[in-house]
Image (cartoon, helix red, strand yellow):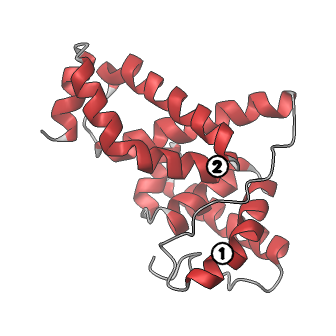
Amino acid sequence: MDDIGLVQLVAGGDRSAFSALMERHQDLVFGVALRLMGNREAALDAVQETFITLFRKADRFRAEAAFTTWLYRVTTNTCYDLLRKQRRRHADPLPEHHDPVDTRTADQFTSVELRPAVESALASIPPEFSAAVILSDLEGLSMEEISRVLDIPIGTAKSRLFRGRRLLAERLGNLLDTNRPLTDDA
C-alpha cells in the first residue's frame, strides 16, 4: 500500500498502518533529525516525537504534496521545537566516536575525516539555515520541496540555503567548496 493509503488508515486509528509507515520512513526521519539535532540521543527523541505527531495529526495530511514532504516538515518542526527547549537548558552531549561512515559520499575516507567538522559547523549555525542546507545538500530536496517543508517562500528558501552554505564555509575554512553540495552525488 502507498503512503497516502497508509496515512488514511492511520487517521482512522489503524496501528498496523502506523507501524508500516514508521518502518518505511524511520531512516529518513532519523537522518534529518540527526543532522538537525547534532547528536544521536536528541535525534532519537526527535524521531519519537515526530512519529507521535504523525499518529496524532494524520487526519491533517491533505495529500496536496508528497507524504515525504509533509513528513520532512513535521520532522524539521519537531527538531526546531526540541532545539528551542534544549537552548533553555543547554548541556553538552557526550562525544560519539563510533558513528558509521556516510555512505552517500564517494570517498569514505574523506567522509570520515570531514564528518565531525561538518556536524560541528552545522550545529553552530542557526537552525533555519542548517535545515535548508541539510534538506538540500544532504537529503537532495529541490528548492520547491524545501519551500514546502519549511513553509517559507521559495526565495526565502534560496536565501537560507545560500546563507547557510556561506556560514558553513566560514566555520569550515577551506575544507569544502561552497559552490557544490556537501555530498558528491547530490
Query: Which of the pair 100/175 is nearer the observer?
Result: 100
State the CA–CA distance, disc 2 to disc 1: 19 Å
Q: Which quarter of the rendering shows the N terminus?
A: top left
Q: Is residue 159 left or right of residue 152?
A: right
The quadrant of the picture occupied by the C terminus is bottom left
- The residue lying furthest to the top in this view is 13
x then y, percent, for residue 164: 70, 64
The residue depicted at 75 percent of the width and 32 percent of the height is: 84
Q: Nearer the viewer, mark 2 or mark 1?
A: 1
Quickly name the residue at label 2: 36
169 to the left or right of 158: right
* Residue 19 in sight from this viewpoint: yes
> Is residue 62 among the parts visible in the rendering?
no
Rendered residue at 67%/45% (across/down): 37
Q: Which mark is residue 8?
A: none
Q: Which residue is mark 1?
A: 112
Tell me the residue at 72%/62% (across/down).
119
Say whether disc 2 or disc 1 marks the residue closer to the N-terminus. 2
Q: Amino acid at mark 2?
A: Leu
Whether residue 142 is situated above or below residue 123 in the rendered picture: below
**Residue kind at label 1, given as amino acid type:** Val
Q: Residue 129 versus residue 36: which sits nearer the camera?
A: 36
Q: What SS does tag 2 mark?
A: helix
Q: Nearer the viewer, residue 71 or 162?
A: 71
Q: Position of residue 26 (x, y in %)?
A: 41, 42
Residue 40, percent across and down? Answer: 65, 45
Considering only vertical position in the picture, is 117 above or below 145?
below
Residue that extends furthest to the left in the rendered view of this protein: 1
